């Protein structure tokens, strides 16, 4: 036993515990969560009329007198099991806004809908993959003595892709401040799209809401150059939302024109700083707005939903644009496992964060995300269902929801989190087994459809 690794010795200890079968049931119920939350307490369900106790649960009968529940972390780098669950919820959330379901009428699939991509502007030339990187017929060097071009052919996964040709010429300050204002830039963009739709059909802008509603779900993604760009599903509804048909003038072409015009026009100005000045921030020149057609002659709705769901589970470390954990000191930046380009962005965040005029941006708090402080996924209220509703539906399906005419009294407290080394080993195996079971189930289902 002494020659075995610590994790193996701990796993054997757990397996010899008389309550191991019940502990394994808890691990399986969490899907093999890598960092479960440990709770202690009880739940009592009573008949609201008679006061009779219908059901009582207490953790005093559980292994270690605690109950394990999911951590619900969306990042696959932190918890693969919970990230898969989050990805599934995201898929259904986005898909419901495209095709209906989850209390959303299926008629929305015939509404004007776009899959929009907005990018960050250029902060300086970076190396690119694909064809020759940045060929220059006349060559030349920048003021720092570095070549202005690059004639190499870089593979998509080459480390140099996304790195500046000249770090000294690259505008790291603008990059960080653009990230810090990206959410505000999106808000201004949505407002301007509404205004342009109204003006294009002769409506007073303040009365647009009486005629139509703009619904969306958007996801933020880091590019190779560590700059955020946005993918969004945008839909035009009637004034009451999904249950209301859009006005007769509503069309995908009109919506597309408004999106392109607003993306070119919208600006957000930073606060003036004696060290930086005042910057006018805008979207990049690359704007894409592809119609989503119910006839299938545009991007596939399921593919769009799957793409968004896949991306929301990626951690910052997985995309190479930051870390998954906040950085609390300058030394953390120097030791972070990131590229030189990303490290410089982190240093810029930290330095700008000490300027009093940028204090509201909390740049030091968001150093690990390179100044970006928005949510990875956001949606308008009327786009579709919510994560809370999906979780409640899952709880009801599993029989965990409250029953009518019943009162539930809950008394819980947090007592810890995570796994011992042996428990982590067993939980990872459970998570892999469940993932493989789901994969085989999907394959069987697809084969069954193919034989019909």
Image (spheres, helix red, strand yellow):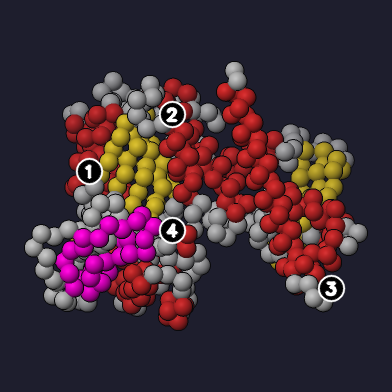
Q: Is residue 362 left or right of residue 451?
A: left
Q: Is 216 placed left or right of 22 in the picture?
A: left
Q: Please, what secondary structure does the residue beneath circle 3 have?
A: loop
Outermost residue toward the bottom in this view: 331
Quote the CA–CA distance across marks 4 and 2. 34 Å
Q: Quick one: SS at disc 4?
A: helix
Q: Label 2: which residue?
A: 242
Stretch in magenta: 146-173
Which image quadrant for residue 224?
Answer: bottom left
Q: N-terminal of the two: label 3 or label 1?
A: 3
N-terminal of the pair, mark 2 or mark 3, is 3
Question: Could you tell me residue 394's position as x and y percent?
Answer: 65, 39
Mark number, residue 262: 1
- Whole-angstrom CA distance, mark 3 to mark 1, is 67 Å
| Nearer to us: label 2 or label 3 | 3
Q: Which mark is residue 276?
A: none
In this rendering, is residue 98 above or below 309?
A: above
Q: Is residue 148 magenta?
A: yes
Viewer-proximal residue among 240 and 77 = 77
Distance, label 2 to label 3, CA atoms, is 63 Å
| Residue receiving disc 4 | 319
């Amino acid at each position: 036993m002494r020659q075995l690794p610590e994790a193996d010795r701990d796993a054997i200890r757990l397996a010899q515990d008389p309550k191991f079968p019940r502990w394994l049931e808890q691990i399986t119920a969490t899907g093999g969560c890598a960092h479960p939350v440990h709770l202690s307490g009880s739940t009592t369900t009573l008949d609201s009329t008679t006061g009779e106790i219908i059901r009582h649960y207490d953790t005093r009968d559980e292994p270690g007198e605690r109950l394990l529940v999911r951590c619900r972390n969306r990042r696959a780098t932190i918890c693969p099991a919970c990230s898969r669950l989050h990805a599934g919820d995201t898929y259904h959330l986005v898909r419901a806004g495209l095709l209906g379901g989850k209390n959303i009428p299926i008629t929305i699939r015939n509404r004007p809908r776009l899959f929009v991509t907005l990018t960050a502007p250029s902060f300086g030339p970076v190396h690119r993959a694909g064809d020759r990187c940045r060929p220059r017929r006349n060559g030349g060097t920048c003021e720092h003595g570095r070549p202005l071009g690059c004639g190499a052919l870089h593979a998509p996964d080459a480390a140099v892709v996304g790195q500046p040709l000249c770090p000294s010429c690259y505008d790291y300050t603008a990059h960080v401040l653009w990230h810090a204002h990206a959410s505000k830039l999106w808000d201004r963009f949505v407002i301007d799209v509404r205004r342009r739709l109204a003006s294009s059909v002769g409506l007073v802008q303040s009365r647009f809401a009486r005629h139509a509603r703009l619904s969306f779900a958007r996801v933020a993604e880091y590019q190779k150059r560590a700059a955020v760009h946005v993918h969004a599903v945008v839909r035009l509804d009637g004034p009451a939302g999904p249950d209301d048909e859009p006005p007769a003038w509503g069309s995908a072409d009109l919506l597309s024109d408004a999106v392109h015009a607003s993306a070119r026009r919208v600006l957000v100005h930073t606060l003036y700083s004696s060290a930086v000045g005042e910057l006018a921030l805008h979207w990049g020149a690359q704007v894409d707005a592809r119609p989503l057609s119910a006839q299938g002659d545009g991007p596939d709705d399921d593919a769009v939903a799957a793409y968004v769901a896949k991306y929301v589970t990626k951690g910052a470390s997985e995309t190479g644009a930051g870390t998954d954990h906040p950085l609390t000191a300058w030394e953390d930046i120097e030791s972070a496992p990131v590229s030189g380009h990303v490290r410089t962005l982190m240093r810029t965040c930290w330095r700008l964060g000490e300027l009093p005029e940028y204090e509201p941006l909390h740049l030091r708090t968001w150093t690990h995300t390179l100044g970006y402080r928005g949510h990875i996924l956001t949606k308008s209220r009327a786009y579709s269902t919510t994560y809370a509703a999906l979780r409640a539906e899952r709880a009801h399906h599993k029989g965990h929801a409250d029953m009518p005419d019943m009162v539930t009294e809950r008394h819980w407290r947090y007592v810890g989190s995570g796994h011992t080394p042996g428990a982590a080993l067993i939980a990872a195996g459970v998570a892999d087994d469940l993932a493989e079971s789901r994969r085989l189930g999907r394959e069987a289902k697809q084969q069954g459809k193919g034989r019909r």
